[in-house]
Image: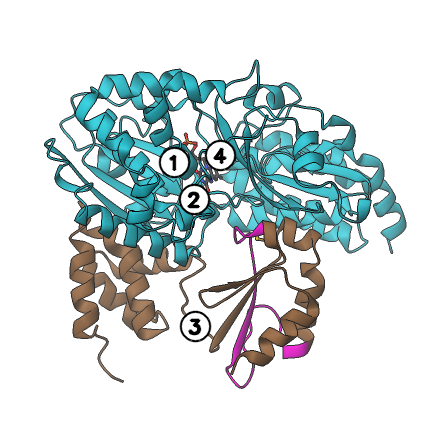
Amino acid sequence: MANEAVLTKNFGTKNSHTLGVYEQGGGYKALKKALTGMKPEAVMAEVDKSGLRGRGGAGFPTGKKWSFIPKDSPKPKYLTVNADEGEPGTYKDRPLMELDPHAVIEGSIITCYAVGIHSAFIYVRGEYVKSVQRLNDAINEAYAGGYLGKNILNTGFDLDIVVHRGAGAYICGEETGLLESLEGKKGQPRMKPPFPAIVGAFQGPTVINNVETMAAIPPIVNNGGEWFNNLGAPGVGGGLKLYPISGHVKKPGVYELPMGTTLRDIIYKHAGGIRDDKKLKAVIPGGSSAPVLRADEIDVKMDYNSLAAIKTMLGSGAIIVMDEDTNMVKTLKVLLKFYAHESCGKCTPCREGTGWMDRIMTRIVKGNGHISDLDTILSISNTIDGKTLCPMGQAAIGPSISFITKFRNEFEDYIRKGRTN
Amino acid sequence: MNKVEFSKKTLDKFKSVIAKYPEKGAALLPTLWLAQQEFSVLTPEVEEYVAGLVGVSPVRVQEVRSFYTMYTARPLGKYHLQLCTNITCSLLGAEELLEHLKKRLKVNCGETTSDKKFTLSAVECLGHCGTGPVIQINDDFHESLTRESLDKLLDSLK
Ligand SMILES: Cc1cc2nc3c(=O)[nH]c(=O)nc-3n(C[C@H](O)[C@H](O)[C@H](O)COP(=O)(O)O)c2cc1C
Ligand code: FES
């Protein structure tokens, strides 16, 4: 079966980012359908049926998330679209914003209609200057075209969308860190509960959804939830997913494939296999926070449940491929330095734990490690486990535990050979 | 020293920005961006000016400015070379490129060349992993780098 392109269908079209081209390809049809022919509850029901789960990392069912927002709220409700895309290995939201910004906007407008929201923010990471520009241009076009602002499509529905540019901090991708940053503060996560659905941006009930989640909404409204669900692999469902793959593969890129495609197929059939026909050593299946897999584990289906069953996760769906020559010790060091650098400093287990692990790995890489350091890292990881304010701690121990337990021999060899004192 | 103040044009931009948020303080990040574009460096004087505009305390501005890596409190070179050294880029050779840059420019990470032309930084994942190794120079990305293409790129920067 040829792979259907849904989220990426406009990527090859010239000027796909402009309103005229988007409309020619059927753009804003879903918005018209929803606003003029569907009750908000009916939109929500289709999204429920679609099996769509959040594409930002946590995989929470999107329809269910929307249903947590109270119908009557004395405070204004908000949508914040998460375009912080900071998870190492992940580069799928950027092409959506650069090449198909109207799809992200149309999905956001429909979401706001379904949930009864009149103010939305798109939080874009600071480095994505072009995404910010493309979104702003598209938003201006959408206002001019009557898709945003007051009385949208003469239905009486009002909505404003504002692009908010971040300034370089991974933690602002975490949903409550994002809210703090949106409010003009340091991006330090909030204690939950209350959950953002009850107390979110500016104390109002808030939906937070990833860019790819938003882009999936218009096709779901156009073709129905069941249609989308059936696009997933047989027995898996849940639609299509963008899998950005990088590292030692012949054809890195963002592949739109049925949810539940096997990791082996993505690496060997779609991404062309390993560069220089080397052997595969390891692969991270869902962004740097997802525990690493060995080469003998790649027959797994790339969906939430199948990956959880082998103790890793789909996360952002970003696949990082490492060939037989990869130095796992140095690679773990790179990741732990990242988590130490990006820990926001608010809670002790994450702040101290990530820093300590980074210092140990630095020592090991320099050749001054001890075999016992490995158990120390595992013990620090276990101390972080489940005890941090936000899931950032969990993100950091995904690599630390999995690299050391799955490649322990290589770590011990490195320490024995490298130790100079 | 001149009084720190936005130009008329920037002040107009600021007014339209602050109107977009339900709370004034939320305009702090965009206002810091405007200030950095206008003054290049976010000095304590600039922070104080921004604090006045947005209606928050100067210490809050300083706290926020220093939390985010893209705001700068010190002058940068004409070109800010930000090489990604995160996982994919390092699998594809970013470490060697970084060593090469340090040697070629005779600076360490975080430093600026004596002619003020280049500042070198090693940064985290830039979201261009499919075409790594990647460097961001000011607002532009340059992808699939090799030592040769990087040298050519630097030669082309005047
Ligand atoms: C440390 C950390 C970083 C995160 N970074 C991102 C990110 O860059 N983009 C994103 O969409 N979600 C990110 N998330 C997940 C968000 O917290 C949140 O679950 C998501 O935006 C919800 O949208 P979704 O339901 O559509 O996935 C991150 C989570 C953590 C703990
Ligand atoms: S790892 Fe370098 S851009 Fe993602």
Give the quarter of the figure containing the N terminus of chain A: top right
Asked if residue B128 lies in the magenta stretch, the reply is: yes
Q: In whole angstroms, how far apart are the C-alphas of marks 4 and 1?
A: 13 Å
> Relative to A360, is A389 above or below?
above
Query: In front: mark 4 or mark 1?
Result: 4
Q: Chain of mark 2?
A: A
Q: Residue furthest front?
A: A24
Q: Chain of mark 3?
A: B
Amino acid tagged 1: Ala
Q: In whole angstroms, how far apart are the C-alphas of marks 3 and 2?
A: 34 Å
The answer to whether A84 appears left or right of B34 in the picture is right
Chain whose colour in the figure is cyan: A
- Magenta part, dominant SS: loop
Give the mark nearer the N terminus: 2 vs 4.
4
Mark 3 = which residue?
B74
Q: Which residues are magenta?
A: B104-129
Instruction: Say which element carries label 4.
Output: loop
Instruction: Say which element carries label 1.
Output: helix
Mark 2 = which residue?
A96
Mark 4 = which residue?
A5
Tell me, yes or no, whether the two marked residues, 3 and 1, touch with CB atoms within 8 Å. no
> Relative to A10, is A391 above or below?
above
Instruction: Say which element carries label 2.
Output: helix
Q: Residue at x 44, y 57 (%)?
A: A127
Residue A349: % across, % down: 54, 37
